[in-house]
């Protein structure tokens, strides 16, 4: 009796023999668990406490970022969220964009956008000056 | 299957919001007026509704993500994956209700 062997397509990329995909799989789970706490507390403090969204203005940001606690919180959240999101979109592009060229250009655009967001966001957190507001009542600006 | 699709859809949605959110927050380096102007957009009722949708997406993605972690790392995870799905919907809903009441009261309150 003749048996037929099912044909399984070779993976699209055989060049890489590294453990990158294993580490990115693990990173999604570790960063995801941390982001649950970082993001839900961020939403609770900014949208539920005080005046909610009505209270979010320059003075509100100045109040938060005059504290190293919130600077560190937001920096960690920025990096983890952007890397988590970039890796998620990378997976989605790999799954749905079938042509090599399409995958290449979509991922190039993705990585460029991610670098812009991480660099810009990091610079904003570290170079923020709460005292450019002449009406500031913060003690550091007196 | 559907939670896998929803996880991807909410993830992409949150990714694009994060991009916009880092750019709007960067306006604090331009001037207090520029930042306050763009924050005014977030206080508009239509955008307020979109924010509620975004928070719903974040809640689902967060708790479904924890479900994925439990399925991958907890020995009993795969066996209880269906019950965990119901848990994801229940916890997301329980947290979303007080949020949406408070948020829409503020957004429609002026």
Image: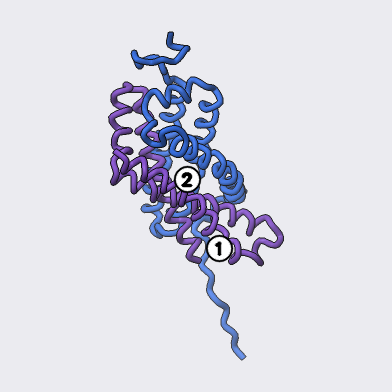
Does residue A72 show up? Answer: yes
Total marks placed? 2
- Which image quadrant is residue B76 in? bottom right
Which chain does purple denote in the image? B
Q: Residue furthest bottom?
A: A1
Report helix, strand or loop for mark 2: helix
- Which image quadrant is residue A141 in? top left
Chain A drawing hue? blue
Does residue A90 show up? Answer: no
Q: Position of residue A89 (x, y in %)?
A: 45, 50
Residue at the image point whose x is 29% and y is 44% from the top? B45
Report helix, strand or loop for mark 1: helix
Checking the image for residue B86, the label placed there is 1
Q: How would you rate the neighbour count of disc 1 (Cα within 10 Å): few for under 14, some for 14-19, many for 20 or more?
A: few
Q: Is residue B105 above or below residue A122?
A: below
The residues bearing labels 1 and 2 have C-alpha atoms spaced at a distance of 25 Å
Residue for badge 2 = A85
Labels 1, 2: front one: 1
Q: How is the image coloured?
A: by chain
Q: Position of residue A31 (x, y in %)?
A: 57, 43
Q: Are marks 1 and 2 in contact (CB under 8 Å)?
A: no
State which quarter of the image contains the C terminus of chain A: top left
């Amino acid at each position: 009796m003749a048996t037929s062997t099912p044909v399984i397509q070779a993976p699209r990329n055989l060049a890489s023999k590294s453990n990158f995909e294993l580490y990115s799989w693990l990173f999604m789970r570790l960063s995801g668990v941390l982001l649950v706490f970082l993001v839900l507390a961020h939403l609770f403090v900014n949208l539920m406490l005080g005046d909610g969204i009505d209270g979010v203005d320059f003075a509100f940001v100045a109040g938060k970022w005059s504290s190293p606690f919130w600077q560190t919180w937001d920096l960690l959240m920025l990096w983890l969220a952007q890397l988590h999101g970039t890796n998620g979109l990378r997976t989605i592009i790999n799954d749905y964009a079938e042509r090599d060229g399409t995958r290449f250009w979509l991922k190039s655009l993705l990585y460029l956008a991610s670098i812009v967001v991480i660099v810009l966001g990091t610079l904003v957190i570290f170079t923020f000056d709460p005292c450019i507001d002449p009406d500031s009542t913060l003690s550091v600006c007196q | 299957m559907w939670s896998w699709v929803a996880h991807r859809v909410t993830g992409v949605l949150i990714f694009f919001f994060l991009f916009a959110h880092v750019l709007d927050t960067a306006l604090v380096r331009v001037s207090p007026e520029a930042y306050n102007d763009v924050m005014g957009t977030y206080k508009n009722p239509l955008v307020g509704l979109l924010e509620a949708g975004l928070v719903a997406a974040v809640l689902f993605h967060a708790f479904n993500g924890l479900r994925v972690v439990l399925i991958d790392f907890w020995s009993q995870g795969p066996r209880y994956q269906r019950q965990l799905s119901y848990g994801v919907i229940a916890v997301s809903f329980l947290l979303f209700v007080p949020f949406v009441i408070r948020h829409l009261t503020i957004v429609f309150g002026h």
